[in-house]
Amino acid sequence: MNIKNAFFINSETLNILFLFFPVAFLMGNAVLNINILLICITGIIVFKKKIFSFKNERFSAVILIFFILVLVSTLIDISKDPKNDHFFRSIAYFRHFFLFLISSYLVGSGKFKIKYFLVSCLVCLLFLSLDIIYQFLNGSDIFGFVAYEGYNEADPHSGKSRYHLAGFLKDEYIAGGYIQKFFVFALILIPIIWKKLDKQKFLISTVLPIIFFSGILFSGNRVPLVMFCVSILLMIILIKELRLSLAIASLFCVLIFTITMKMNDNLRGYYISFYQNSSHVIAVMKKFIPKKYPELEKNKEKKCIEKDNDVYCEHFYQQSKKLKSRYEEIPSFGSGHFVIYLTAIDVWIDSPIIGNGIKSFRTKCLTKLHLPNRICSSHPHNYYLELLNDTGLLGTLFFICAVFYLITNKFFNFKYYEKNEKFLFICLLIIIIAEFFPLKSSGSFFSTTNASWIFLILGMLNGLKKIKK
């Protein structure tokens, strides 16, 4: 018996798995990895050798080379450092390449049912956003999870204040980032479903952005709020069907932001500190990047341990206090990203061409802790710095040029797209611009959530030929 018929595996099954993707994203890495694994297995069974045909798929071949570069850079570092145990991680990372191939072929074959996927995004976003809003107003969300668990009261101007709401995600403070990633998909559902907007549909397309904005604002995730505003601006420029409703919604969002800042001291202090930190980042980086400390090389820290995905050094903090009297230190800005960026730049300079392999920053940063204004973390908190650290200049430029080529190639074919294809292209373009905005802080490029999101988006864009209506 054919395995496809025995288990009812077909393109409909694959669409259901993609429909579940936004839900799995919310449920954590374990569920998301299972979802990706099922997509990969189902896609290979349904499409067989078709997804591995790179004859007319240059971009797929280019992405494969990038994954090979990640593996090679890891192997080279393993040959230098026997303690490097990331070989299996570099192999497991290939699951995202299969996710890319399958999403690309599913969209390109015209079997991707876009409306189902968009509806799934909309439902998840509404549920999470409304839960966050309810938690902000009521003190606890609809499941009884108490608000402000992530807030430690401090002087708002010291940069040490924390304000986060997570709704039903409990202590996973990623609600704002989730809404910002998926909300464009939810908004393009309106022009895809309705050819003409009447008053009721116009009202829906005005209210939805306000709900999403409020969810991100109250979550306390500040960078996603900025990226949300950038995305809305791009949608106003590029999607004429939503231009008026989004413009009106933007005015209401400004009003909500102003009123909230005046009425909530904690939230106001948190966003003020973000503004102050952001306005100083370029000046601080320019001042401290060129500084060298050759006299401190003999003081390299050796006694360090890795715990809970972070690196701790026994004598580092004592050593830092001694250095304060001799070297100027960066002020304690809230998130600590400045010193992480400085450390990442130092680590990259040690291996500028091929990098140090996947997820190597958490161990390579140990070699920089003898310097002032340096610290360790699980990742550099910026996609470009992490790519430079892990794949070097070779892998970074290769990946960036590949994505740029994909976007320009699809853009030149824009006039040949049908209605749904045009909306999806604009949607994917806006998502990519927001996701790879150079100056924003971010999670790890190689984490399960970010990698699956990035290569799903790139796969959909690469397969953009026909969309099932």
Image (cartoon, rainbow, N blue to C red):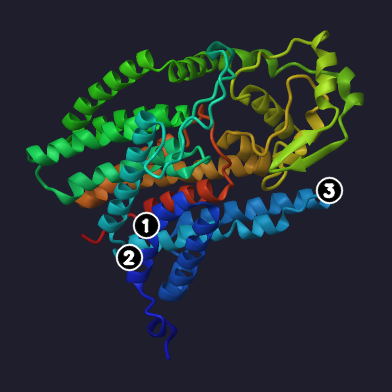
Residues 83 and 413: in front is 83
Query: Considering only vertical position in the picture, is 393 above or below 20?
Result: above
Is label 2 in contact with label 1 (beta carbons under 8 Å)?
Answer: yes
Q: Position of residue 281 (x, y in %)?
A: 57, 17
**Residue under label 2:** 109
Q: Earlier in the sequence, mark 1 or mark 3?
A: 3
Q: Residue at x 72, y 56 (%)?
A: 87
**Residue at coordinates 34% horizontally, 33% vertically from top-left?**
133
Dot 1 and dot 3 residues touching (CB under 8 Å): no
Q: Nearer the viewer, residue 31 or 240?
A: 31
**Image point (61%, 18%), residue name:** 333
Give the spatial CA distance, label 2 vs label 1.
8 Å
Measured from the top left, where is residue 116 in percent x and y?
A: 28, 58
Question: The residue tagged with tag 2: helix, strand or loop?
Answer: loop
Location of residue 369 (image quadrant): top right
Q: Amino acid at mark 2?
A: Ser
380 is higher (above) or lower (below) than 320: below
Residue at the spot of label 3: 80
x and y percent of residue 154 in the render? 57, 16
Q: Report the quarter where the N terminus lies.
A: bottom left
Q: Nearer the viewer, residue 282 or 452?
A: 452
